[in-house]
Image (cartoon, rainbow, N blue to C red):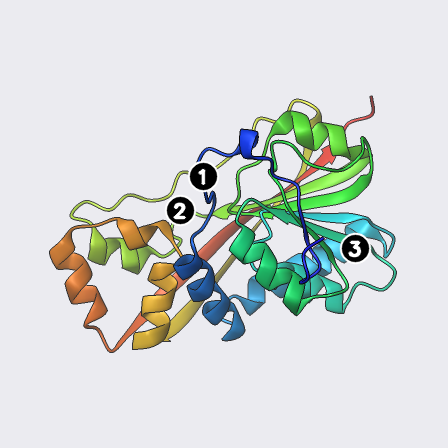
Amino acid sequence: MAKEGYVNLLPASRKRSKDPGDNREMVAARRRVHDAQLYRPLAEKLSTWIHTLADNQGPVLDLGCGEGYYTGVLNREAGSTSIYGIDIAKPAVRLAAKAIPGVCFAVASSFDIPLADGSVDVAFSVFAPTDPEELARVIRPGGYYLDVSPAPLHLWQLRELLYENPRHHDQLVRNLPSFEPVDTQQLEFTLQLADTQLRDLIAMTPYAYGGRREHKQKLTQLDSLELQVAFSLNLYRRRPD
């Protein structure tokens, strides 16, 4: 148990690099974006939906919890629900554990979840990879998995500025043999970003490494940018064994 309150359950044999996951700069940028409440509409949508599904009992599992923004919003309205968060990036989990002491956090992989079979009522992930077999193992029959992925027009204005021939995000449909689709919803809103917030948003995404250099230089010189954000929320129910 680390002094911040999390446990490190990612053995060296399961790591693909010395420090897997988001680096410290990406984690810090994401924390600043979330502290500014730029993604608050998504957090509120998730919180309302998940608490309805969990019926104030839980447990709820945040897969790829990062520095704990969505976990924290859930925890503030949790009632008696138990909440767990895992991520492979130790700097992110350290921040999450320090900010939200009432939640159990672990450095762990969503492809090797450190929870017992059938122990989770609801699991969710926001832009994080997951393993269908592990989801089926830890989510109880009748439980739910909520997947949040980028909708086709997510951050479209940013893509237009970075790339010569920008493409829409693919509409992600997960192949989950042990689950049945229940509902799909879309959430879209617009952000008006000042220069520092724009730089932080870029730094917390893969766009920090993409696009042509000259395009990125022009982007960093902008004083502000109106940016569309768009999410697909796909809900699945675990089939009975």
Which residue in the protein does label 2 denote?
152
Residue hosting label 3 = 52
114 vs 59: above or below = above
Using the image, tell me which numbered label, if any, was put on residue 159. none
Q: Amino acid at mark 3?
A: Thr
The residue most toward the left is 214
Q: Position of residue 63 (x, y in %)?
A: 63, 45
The answer to whether the residues at label 1 and label 2 have Cβ atoms under 8 Å apart is yes
- Disc 2 is placed on an element classified as loop
The residue pinned by badge 1 equals 171
Q: What secondary structure is found at the residue carrying circle 1?
A: loop
1 or 3: tag closer to the N-terminus: 3
Name the residue located 76 percent from the left edge and 54 percent from the top edge: 83
Q: Secondary structure at mark 3?
A: helix
- Quarter occupied by the C terminus: top right
User: Residue 213's x, y, as percent?
Assistant: 15, 54
